[in-house]
Image (tube, grey):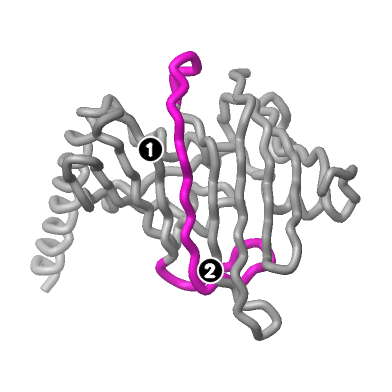
Amino acid sequence: MKQFLFLIALMISLSATSQKDMVSEKLEEYNFSSESLSSGLKDADAEHYFDAKLTTDDGTKIKVEEAKFDPTKNIGERWILVSVDGNAPSNKDLKNFDKAHNTKQDDINAEVDDSSWKVEKDDDEYLVISFKYIRESLPKKYNFLADCKGLAYFNKSKLSLEKAEFVSEKPLKIKVFNVLKLDMIVNFTYDSELDSYLIESEEIDMDVKLLGQQISVKESYEFSNYKKK
């Protein structure tokens, strides 16, 4: 029985290695490293200053937060809330923002599970690769991505990563929201001067259960003014 279980484990391991090798070969055609899929999620060794505009729309009101990220500050202090709806943030705003965005550990950097790589589609227009993040590697802000399937879209005409999509595979808890369904789109751009992929925007659509009612919540993040430290 033990030998049988060992053979099954070995076959699974070989299959995962084979999938990773096949994906790696595909990515080599784009001169692309899988680390680029997590570079925008890193807090601990982030290399860029940037500004961020965060908009939340729950169908009844729209909240706009202006923020900035300073990679030279101490861990837990790098995300800085500048304003809320055009006004100076209150102590409550600052506390909630800090809790939602600032990573408190210095070794948290998103990492893809090697066994999760898979070529989903390979046609004339796109190469689409699926993957999953290791939960323990994710910053608190993105912890919910461990329960999502990731899809990376490589544009064949541009030979570059265009976007990543994350689709929930189970109900999630995000901030104060009990999320029944989530779809998140992350749009990337390649900056030749900085020699790295940068996140231009994130769009998150959620079906949320709140006070016994199901509502739609949309969060959008716009990132700008990237600068290396």
Single out the residue that lies furthest toward the top.
193
The percent position of residue 143, horizontal first and vertical second, equals 54, 55
Residue at numbered disc 1: 162
Task: Please say whether residue 183 is one of the residues in the magenta stretch.
Answer: yes
Q: CA distance from mark 2 to mark 1?
A: 26 Å
On residue 178, the disc is: none
User: How many discs appear?
Assistant: 2
The percent position of residue 223, horizontal first and vertical second, equals 61, 35
Residue at image position (30%, 28%) is: 158
Residue 103 placement: quadrant? top right
Above or below — where is 149 with respect to 70? below
**Image quarter hosting the C terminus:** top right
Q: Is residue 146 left or right of residue 53?
A: left
Q: Main secondary structure of the magenta part?
A: strand
The percent position of residue 194, horizontal first and vertical second, equals 50, 17
Single out the residue that lies furthest toward the bottom.
212
The percent position of residue 29, horizontal first and vertical second, equals 20, 28
**Image quarter hosting the N terminus:** bottom left
Within-10-Å neighbours for mark 1: few <14, some 14–19, many 20+: some
Mark 1 residue element: strand
Residue at image position (53%, 36%) is: 200
Please tell me whether mark 2 or mark 1 is closer to you in this view: 1
**Which region of the structure is painted magenta?**
169-196
Residue 2 placement: quadrant? bottom left
Above or below — where is 43 with respect to 221? above
Q: Is residue 227 left or right of residue 2?
A: right
Amino acid type of disc 2?
Leu
Within-10-Å neighbours for mark 2: few <14, some 14–19, many 20+: many
Amino acid type of disc 1?
Glu
On residue 172, the disc is: 2
